[in-house]
Image (tube, rainbow, N blue to C red):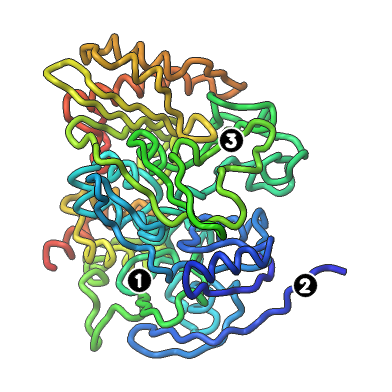
Amino acid sequence: MADITIPERIPITLVVNGERRALEVVPWTTLLDALRDRLELTGTKKGCDHGQCGACTVLIDGRRVNSCLTLAVMKDGAEITTIEGLAKDGTLHPLQQAFIDHDAFQCGYCTPGQICSAAGLLAEGRARNADEIRELMSGNLCRCGAYPNIVAAIEQAMSRS
Amino acid sequence: MNNFRYSRASDLADAIRLLAADPGAKLIAGGTNLIDLMKENVERPSRLIDISRLPLRDVEETADGGLRIGALVPNSDLAYHPLIEQRYPLLASAILAGASAQLRNMASVGGNLMQRTRCPYFYDTTTPCNKRSPGSGCSALDGLNRNHAILGTSNSCIATNPSDMSVALAALGALVHIARPSGQRTIALTDFHRLPEDKPHLDTNLGSGEIIIAIELPPHGFARNYSYLKIRDRLSYAFALVSVAAALDLEGNAIGEARLALGGVAHKPWRSLEAEAALRGQAATPDHFGRAADLLLQGATARSHNGFKIDLARRAVVRALMQAASATPQSQAHKKIA
């Protein structure tokens, strides 16, 4: 007989974009799947699902991470910020505005991950110029090739922050 | 992913107990490599033991002037730690050469040491692989082996260790502190990873039931003359074809202590005491660096597609030593190779 592990549902609480959300997850639920399929926050995108493209980037306790390689159960109690949580009181986050100003996307699929990653980058304060932005944004791929405009958008947000 | 059970360890003793109780269990901290391997069905743990909340996140000075780094310090925190930036910039540079900002935020120091090869046949469960399935054969020997090892290989496995951090730790002479049911032990980083021999399924000498708790750096960090040079197919966010950690003590142009380790070329960070000894007392010149590179690469053998790595490694060693000698280390952001 096959050794089957019966799913155990584990109650967790996530503070997502400032709101406490209680849910039960099986241990193999990634944070990405919990956000998209359970909390219906589909702004966070599933690209490669292997930590290679960055489309799933969110902020956990202020740090940018790949939500596809994060188990939801391990983040019980954490504060999660997704693309849906960046605008405040109807005003776009400076990075969102900068991406529009610089036309920093084509299809837009990588954009939520790009913007969340850039928000993490600004908080880290390690990038000082375009070379360093490129290097520290290398975990976010854009198959449309909007990179020059993405760098310009981040430079704009950085100069105003 | 297979179904598995989940336990959150309340303390180190609890983690050791949980690990001993279930031979199919695996520890998880950052999860960046393990969850990926689970999605590919390469790893199928019966239980994950979450150690991410254990208090192993300190970077402390040791009595002899070195540093003790908790196993759960995230890679990014270590690379940007003021004491690492000031005293061990070779280590900071190597960490920042690896992965992406997101992954470095997640990955722990202990997990970095435990990451597995990126050999595509190891990942592809439809192909033979002695590392994944002992005795099934090695698909890389006569397959696509452009990225594979040129040193310390066996007929069972030609996979490489993918870590950048470990290459710098090997050069710096780091120690690994390990907890186990009967107490603790300490081994040199260079003895932590194994060569494949006839047991390529064993990446390291960490015993089942053992947990890495800290890395220790000796006092001497070679903060003045060092370079971490990583050569890869794209300029960022790619594994090394060849990488070099080089560190020198210089008095004028005369070499005192020298350290040299290679990444991307073997199943473990590749260091040669003979190559380092050959540098001591010599002038810091390209000729002497080339001689050291030849000694470091002694016994290198190529398979069908990776012969270029031998020449590439030789030139990279000379270049990294030149960068170290001139105190112009390779920048990980500005890609031009000086």
Residue at numbered disc 3:
B159
Neighbor class of circle 1 (other Cα within 10 Å; few <14, some 14-19, many 20+) is: many
Residue at numbered disc 1:
A59
Residue under the point 50% across and 41% down: B192
Instruction: Pinpoint the chain carrying mark 1.
Output: A
Amino acid type indicated by mark 3:
Ala
Amino acid type indicated by mark 2:
Ile
Residue A7 sits above or below residue A151 on the image: below
Closer to viewer: mark 2 or mark 1: 2
The answer to whether residue A106 shows anywhere in this view is: no
Neighbor class of circle 3 (other Cα within 10 Å; few <14, some 14-19, many 20+) is: many
**Residue B83 location, x and y as percent?**
21, 50
Residue B150 sits above or below residue A131 on the image: above
Amino acid type indicated by mark 1:
Leu
**Left or right: A41 as drawn, with respect to A79:** right
> Which residue is nearer to you in this view: A31 or B170?
B170
How far is the residue under mark 3 from the one under mark 2? 32 Å
**Residue B298 location, x and y as percent?**
48, 15
